[in-house]
Image (cartoon, rainbow, N blue to C red):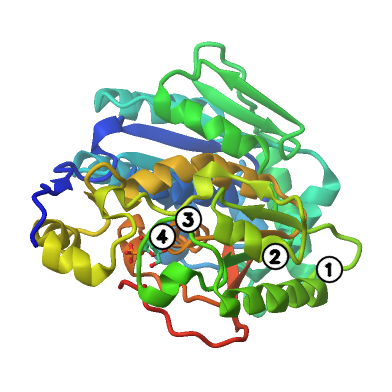
Amino acid sequence: MERAVSGVRSKRVPGERDKATTVLSMVGLPARGKTYIGRRVARYLSWLGHPTRVFNVGSYRRRQIGASQPADFFAPSNKEGRQVLHDLAMTALDDMLVWLREGGEVGIFDATNSTKERRRLVEERCRKEGLPVVFIESFCNDPGVIEANVRDTKLKSPDYVDMDPDAAAQDFLRRIAHYESMYETLEDPNQSYIKIIDVGRQVILNRIHGYLPARLAPLLIDLHVSPRPIWLTRHGQSDYNRHGRIGGDPELSPAGEEYAKHLAEFVRKNAPRDQEVSVWTSTLRRTIQTATKITRSPRTWRALDEIDAGVCDGMTYDQVRIEMPDVWAARSADKFRYRYPRGESYEDVIQRLDPVIIQLERQRSPTLVIAHQAVLRAIYAYLMDRPPGECPSISVPLHTVIQLTPTAYGCEEKRFALPPNVEDQGAGG
Ligand code: F6P
């Protein structure tokens, strides 16, 4: 029997609804985490459907004049060097403006932009294109943070390849001193800016208006790089999984209960000593049951519930294909944007996961997220910086723990397949 239900496929491209072309211009001395912040913001906004790209002036410098410039190249007294750096910055800025003109939504201009004069120039060029500029400054004088940043990122940078680490650190500190001598912090009350002081101890928002810049504040308040594992796993096999039925609120199968035991053992063995593991589940029984061997009181999030399959909830994929061929065809044609009739699309799932991601970024201890296939694909895409459109094809098998450990510029991934091995009827590629 063919059921008459029309497919609902949104025509817009991701982000189009809220398109608000914007320039975010980083500000800060070297080793204050500007590139880290810029990339995090880019990953977050791209995931939310706003095409975002970072234009890093350091990369332009390395490409165009070579990586190994000594500290004195950056000295204010080196007029020639200053001119070269200025020209490189303007080239990067112009490239960004071209990219925005051609359809990009958020351009991140990643340079020190450490003087008022430079920032005035950035604003002037952007204003000519009718683009608003929001400055994001990382202001920090904590020697511990600066040292860690130099060690973890700068000494590994192509600028110092093959150089003795002590000599490289000395050179880099001299470079910072040159910038310090001309640095002017953000303080113009007429400018739009977010100033992050001492890695979030204080965050100042000045003239922050509009949907997109306001959305950045919760992310920027708590950015940190404390290494901690994030474990993502689907619930143990459910009765629905056994029969390839989608959605619903089924219980675990006997094999699923077995997995819950192995998962608890995995967490006990792998949790770093003296650190409490936060366990998050959806509100659905199969995830809560999977957590019971670890905790009786997980944090249950409605936002972690599986994609709502609407009128298809409880059906098998074969049933959908035969009884609702329109739905099947439309979903197959664009699985990311296709919204089940009276249900959700992957794009919808991403929007509702936003608070989960913000909280995940805040966590400083290990977090175990027990959820569902579509939801975990969306979270994985964020953490691994995969284009959101790829979400529906990311592999998240049953009875597998995906361990992601955030590092300075991404996440390290390890996968652990735990027993029992089960067939995945609903892997739905
Ligand atoms: O099959 C298990 C399941 O979690 C379903 O409940 C859900 O509809 C489906 O996976 C999501 O995967 P896909 O988007 O590939 O259909």
> Does residue 7 appear to the left or right of 365 in the view shown?
left
Secondary structure at badge 2 equals loop
**At 15% across and 56% down in the image, what residue appears?**
327
Crowdedness near tag 4: few (<14), some (14–19) or many (≥20) residues, C-alpha within 10 Å: many
Give how far across and how far down residue 203 sits, in percent.
67, 27
Q: Amino acid at mark 3?
A: Asp
Residue 343 falls in image quadrant: top left
Give how far across and how far down residue 82 sits, in percent.
51, 45
What residue would you read off at disc 3? 249
What residue would you read off at disc 2? 229
- Mark drawn on residue 374: 4
Quadrant for ligand 1? bottom left
Taking 316 as reference, is 277 above or below it?
A: above
Q: Amino acid at mark 4?
A: Ala
Give how far across and how far down residue 145 sits, in percent.
79, 49
Q: Earlier in the sequence, mark 4 or mark 3?
A: 3
Q: Is mark 4 within 8 Å of ligand 1?
A: yes
Closer-to-camera residue (426/390):
426
Q: Earlier in the sequence, mark 2 or mark 3?
A: 2
Q: Nearer the viewer, mark 3 or mark 1?
A: 3
